[in-house]
Image (tube, rainbow, N blue to C red):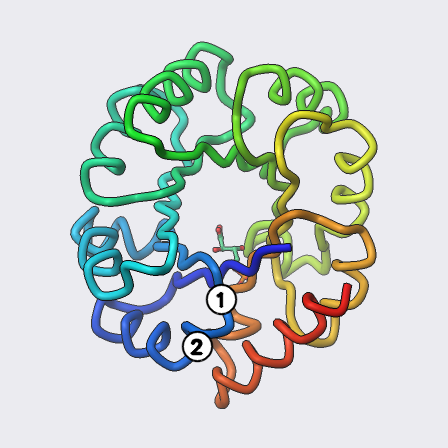
Amino acid sequence: MELQLALDLVNIPEGKEIVGEVEEHIDIVEIGTPVVINEGLRAVKEMKEAFPDLKVLADLKIMDAGGYEVMKASEAGADIVTVLGATDDSTIKGAVEEAQKHGTKILVDMINVKDLEERAKQVDNLGVDYICVHTGYDLQAEGENPFAQLETIKGIVNNAKTAVAGGIKLATIPEVVASQPDLVIVGGGIAGQDDKKSAASQIREVINKA
Ligand SMILES: O=C(CO)[C@H](O)[C@H](O)COP(=O)(O)O
């Protein structure tokens, strides 16, 4: 089981400082959508240069022009790029095709997909590397979480790896790992804590025991 740190509410120097504190406990560092909006793909490039041993995920949440956007993120050094499950199959196929040219992986984010079972089955046949259930910030604020959705895709997805994101923290990590996802994504549960190193280390420990 891999652990991904999501960086969303930081600039590039702040992001590097956090990763420097926790790098021994994580596998993947996510350049979150707000960071890409603020800093551009330069953030991906700089993070990869600073931490070449970590995988870097560019959270572009691609909805169109899958091939072109995956190409640009791959050129910046991204190891994994996100595409939205809510988009059309042709965008996902274009993203997968381009990713294969660069050795990049595609993570499909199922945020706000209405018929999760049906769409997860379809996406699982498109050659993507990860399928991720995700409760975004706005629905987290309404008290929702992605745990039941994780159970749903665990019973359906046969080809891709499974991933989960959305408000996961130390207190909820045991419930998450009980479903055995391949990838756990934690943002505020590490980056928003006073002692980030300790949070990352404790979360890693729970994951390692699962
Ligand atoms: O993609 C995101 C928001 O759209 C976040 O990166 C993801 O939800 C993880 O962050 P957190 O653990 O703070 O919810």
* CA distance separating discs 1 and 2: 7 Å
Q: Residues within 10 Å of mark 1 (few under 14, many from 20)?
A: many
146 with respect to 38 (left or right): right
Identity of the residue drawn at 51% across and 82% down: 193
Between 43 and 145, the one lying in front of the other is 43
Q: Measuring from the top left, give residue 40's x and y in whole percent.
A: 19, 49
149 with respect to 60 (left or right): right
Q: Name the residue beneath numbered marker 2.
A: 22
Q: Measuring from the top left, give residue 127's x and y in whole percent.
A: 53, 19
Q: Is residue 78 above or below residue 193?
A: above
Q: Is residue 154 above or below residue 97?
A: below
Identity of the residue drawn at 44% across and 77% down: 22
Kindly state the secondary structure of the residue where label 2 is placed. helix
Q: Measuring from the top left, give residue 18's x and y in whole percent.
A: 36, 76
Q: Is residue 169 above or below residue 175?
A: below
Tag 1: residue type? Ile
Q: Name the residue beneath numbered marker 1.
A: 26
Circle on res. 183: none
Q: Quadrant of residue 153?
A: top right
Kindly state the secondary structure of the residue where label 1 is placed. loop
Q: Quadrant of residue 205?
A: bottom right
Tag 2: residue type? Val
Q: Residues within 10 Å of mark 2 (few under 14, many from 20)?
A: some
Q: Are marks 1 and 2 in contact (CB under 8 Å)?
A: yes
Identity of the residue drawn at 64% across and 49% down: 164
Q: Quadrant of residue 71?
A: top left
